Every structure is written in C-alpha cells, then in structure tokens.
Amino acid sequence: MTIKLICLDADDTLWHNMRHFNATEHALLDMLRPFAEADVTRERLIACETRNLPLYGYGAKGFTLSMIETAVEVAGEKLSASMIEGILAAGRALLAHPVELFDGMEVTLRALAQVGPLVLVTKGDLLHQESKLAASGLGDLFSGIEIVSDKKADTFRTLFTRFGIAPEEAVMAGDSMRSDILPALEAGAWAAFIPQEGAWSHESARAPSDHARFVQLERLADLPGWIASAA
C-alpha cells in the first residue's frame, strides 16, 4: 500500500461533537417530560431528524429545527413561547460550544502529514464547520478542506481526481461507518474506522467483513503505524 493522500473526518475524529448533541437532546427531553416519556420523545426526534435531513442537511441548525418540530408534535397546543425560546437557546449553545480536541491531535496530524497531504472531508453546516476548524488551530495542517452535504462514493472519486491520485493511493479515516468508511471503500480507497462512544445511530452500518483495505483502530494516533505496517 502506497498512500499519497490522507482524508480525515472532523467531528468525533479530530474533536468531540456528539457529546454536545447528546447533551442538547437531553435538555429537550427534560423540557418535554411533562408531555411524554423520554423514550417517546427521543423516538419522535429521531424520526423527525431522519425526515428532515434531505431538507435541512446535517448540523446544529437542522437539529434545532427538528427539536422545535418534535416539541410541536409532542406538546401540541400546550407548547409555550418560553419553551420555544428554551429550545432556541439550546441550539445556540450547541453552535457556540468550545472545540475540544482529542488528546495529541496536533502531534498525530503532523505525523500523518509526513506520509502525505491531509484533506479534511466533513459534513455539516458550512459556517459552523469553518468556525470549528478555525477554533481548532489545525487548519494550516490541511492541504484541502471539503465541507459537503453528504459523503458518497462519488464525493471521494471527485476528490481523488482533483488531487491526481488513484483511489488505492488514498485512505479515509473517521468515526462513521456509513459516511466515512463504506463510501471510501466503494470508491476504491483504504479506510480506517475509529469508533467513538455515543455515536449517532444514523451513522451506524454493518462493518465490511474481511475487506483487504479496511481496518478498525482504537484512535487516530494509530493510523500512521497502520499505514507503515501495510506499506
């Protein structure tokens, strides 16, 4: 394996993300507890998010809209203006939370940059993702930034063509089996799955069995060693 391009996810690969979404979700469940059990509200929210993804895309803003819609469904006419204000405040806090890098991230990225150019490939709201990258202090380590509405095999094929490399000369690393791993493998690249606790159920998928270009790692810091061992 000769790697000439390293593609990396952002949320829950470079920095914590889902812990903030989960905290915001719990705040909504508490707000709506007078109207429904937490499990019922959570099911409604998941269904609402799934239904709205084609309209709003991924990210905190779409999640906030889905929270409001869920509150309308659960509370009905009893939903007060103050509750809507509370949901909006939770959404604003989600957008404004500080960026918390995983341990040793800058050292890891500098080690990976010795192998090949780094490209950030992430989903979500453009402004929010750009602001998180700026706050992370890691932006200068990347040769390319791709903020996309979704990650498909064609997303990676286009990226590989732009950088002038063959798919088998690229690796994608991330925490989402659905969005990071399976599309990269379908495009012909290598893929390193780095699962994180509290992952969003929407991003789960069955892992490939006995795929020659797939590996599961405990942390991103293990990626340089895997690339070297598989060379």
Image: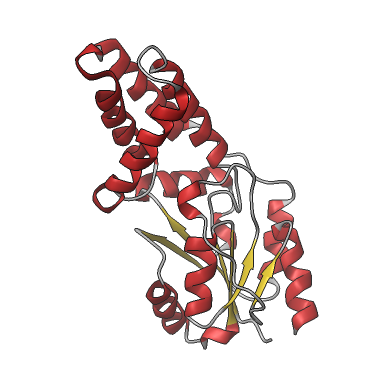
Q: In this image, 205 relative to 155: left or right? A: right
Tag count in the figure?
Answer: 0
Q: Is residue 136 left or right of residue 45?
A: right
- Toward the viewer: 142 or 191? 191
Asked whether residue 94 appears in the rendered view, the answer is: yes
Q: Identify which residue is drawn at 67% across, 61% down.
A: 109
Location of the C terminus (image quadrant): bottom right
Image x and y of residue 10, in percent: 54, 54
Query: Which of 114/33 is in front?
Result: 33
| Picture layout, residue 4 above or below residue 55 | below
- Look at 72% across and 67% down and name the residue there: 223
Give the x, y percent position of residue 186: 48, 78
Residue 61 drawn at (x, y percent): 33, 38
Examine the image and state in which quarter residue 48 appears.
top left
Query: Which quadrant is the N terminus positioned in?
Result: bottom right
Residue at (74% x, 69% y) in the render: 224
